[in-house]
Amino acid sequence: MSKELIIEAGRTEKKYWQDIWRYRELFYFLAWRDILVRYKQTAIGIAWALIRPFLTMIVFTIVFGKLANLPSEGAPYPILVFAAMLPWQFFANALSECSNSLIDNANLIAKVYFPRLVVPISAVIVSFVDFLISGMILLALMAWYNFVPSWRILTLPIFVMIAFAAAMGGGLWLSALNVQFRDFRYIVPFIVQFGLYISPVGFSSSIVPQQWRWLYSLNPMVGVIDGFRWAIIGGESRIYWLGFLLSLSLVGVLLISGIWYFRRMERTFADII
């Protein structure tokens, strides 16, 4: 009498998270593969991770810093912009990469069991690598302008973790939704583009009227960007703490709900894909 071996996901949350640790090498494999594929056969390779945010920074500096003459919180305007470009580009890239991550790995998902959460997390890690590379531009700008950060720079890892949580939460929602509704491959670029305009990337959120700042902070990236600027620029940079706590709470809700929804839909991925 033949026996069948059925491989399935852990029935309990504890076993599921243990499986993620067991498959930790898959994180490295998927992330490294995506990094190689992204820049393979390009003339300047990984330099694209530097060129895109640098050109965006120049445009925002000219439009908002030179033409509109908006305040720069006591720092050179390019540094004000790039302190916001870092978390925003990380978040935007993570949403784009995560939204297609399950579809791009459909063959792997349909044939082999592993915690599906590995796939969108590896996509976020790839975006985080771009984030680290782009940080070289910020260091170069600081050297160019002889700008020395204050002690607040020591708190930057805290805001990096908040940005990671926001990217992870949004990425989990979009990756799961894109499996069910392929329309999201067209919606995500619009979300990213629209989000850039309503986030304080090219300008300081301090120009928003005080009575509307709490409403503006309903955009979770407002608190993340303000935190980055507070840590990097120091000096005149201030955090609107009510808005920051509101944004932080929304990031927490986004992450927890993203994990919940992804886990709820996970068992159906192989059938739908």
Image (tube, rainbow, N blue to C red):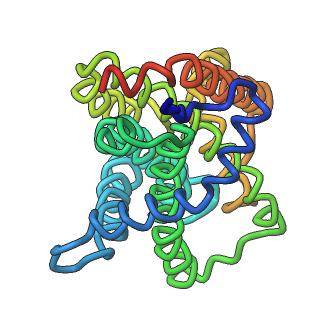
Tell me, yes or no, if residue 62 can be seen here: yes
Image x and y of residue 127, in percent? 46, 55
Q: Position of residue 177 (x, y in %)?
A: 40, 20
Q: Is residue 129 above or below residue 73?
A: below
Instruction: Give the residue displayed 67% in from the left and 31% down from the top.
Output: 10
Quick one: 227 or 27, which is closer to the camera? 27
Residue in the picture at 47% in, 64% down:
29
Q: Where residue 147 sits: x, y (%)?
A: 63, 77
Please say whether residue 213 is visible from this viewpoint: no
Which of the 4 image quadrants contains residue 57? bottom left
State which quadrant residue 48 falls in. bottom left
Residue located 44% across and 25% down the image:
176
Q: Residue furthest front?
A: 1
* Relative to 208, 192 lies left or right: left
How many numbered tags mark residues here? 0
In the image, is residue 116 above or below residue 177? below
In this orientation, which residue lies closer to the viewer: 54 or 33? 33
Please indicate whether residue 90 sits to the left or right of residue 51 in the image: right
**Where does the image place residue 163, in percent across and percent down from the top left?**
62, 45
Q: Is residue 52 above or below residue 166?
A: below
Quarter of the image where the C terminus is located: top left
